[in-house]
Image: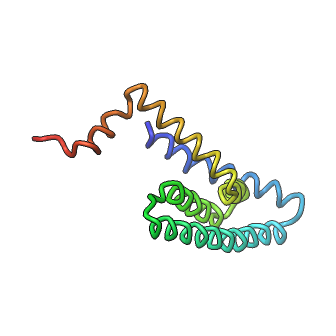
Amino acid sequence: MVFGRLALLFILMPLFELVLLLKVNTFIGWERTLAIVIVTGLLGAAAAKTQGLLVLSRIRQDLAEGRVPASQLLDGVMILLAGALLITPGLITDTFGFLLLLPFVRTGLKAWLRRKLEQKIRDGSGSMRITYWRQGPPET
C-alpha cells in the first residue's frame, strides 16, 4: 500500500511540477522561470543549512544537559526533508520545502504526528512494534 502511494507520488509530482512550470513560463518567460527555480533552490539550501545548524545546536545543548532531544531530532528530519524538497526543481516542492522551514509548521506537524501515533497505539495497530522495542526480538 505504501509502495503504491510512493510510486504514484514519484510519477505524478514531476508531472504536476512540469505543468506548473510550463504555465508560469507562458506568463513570465523561460528565463524568469528558470531564475525562480535556481534562486529558490539557493535560498532554500541556505535557509535549510541555517535552520539545521540551529537545531544541531539545540540537540547538543539538550544532550549536554542530560535531556533526550526527541523534538529537535524530528525538527532535524523535517529540515533535511525541506532541504531535499528545495533543491528539487519545481515550485510545488519549493513551497512544501519552505513551509517545513517554518518552526510553527514543524510544531504543528509534530503535534499531528504525535496524535496519529497515539491513535495507532490506542487502536492496537502500533502495539506490535512498541512491544518489540520494549521486549526485544521474539524468540525463534
Could you say which quadrant of the image residue 17 lies in? Answer: bottom right
In this figure, what is the number of numbered marks? 0
- The spot of residue 130 in percent (x, y) is 33, 39
Could you say which quadrant of the image residue 95 lies in? Answer: bottom right
Q: Please tell me which residue lies in front, 80 or 132.
A: 132
- The spot of residue 57 in percent (x, y) is 56, 71
Residue at 44%, 58% in the rendered image = 68
Residue at 57%, 66% in the rendered image = 55
Q: Is residue 74 above or below residue 118?
A: below
Q: Is residue 3 above or below residue 121?
A: below
Q: Please tell me which residue lies in front, 77 or 22.
A: 77
Q: Please tell me which residue lies in front, 61 or 123.
A: 61
Residue at 84%, 69% in the rendered image = 32
**Residue furthest front as drawn:** 65
Is residue 34 found left or right of 96 in the rendered image? Answer: right
Could you say which quadrant of the image residue 37 lies in? Answer: bottom right
Q: Please tell me which residue lies in front, 65 or 134.
A: 65
Q: How is the image coloured?
A: rainbow
Residue at 47%, 34% in the rendered image = 118
- The spot of residue 67 in percent (x, y) is 45, 60
Q: Is residue 19 above or below residue 119?
A: below
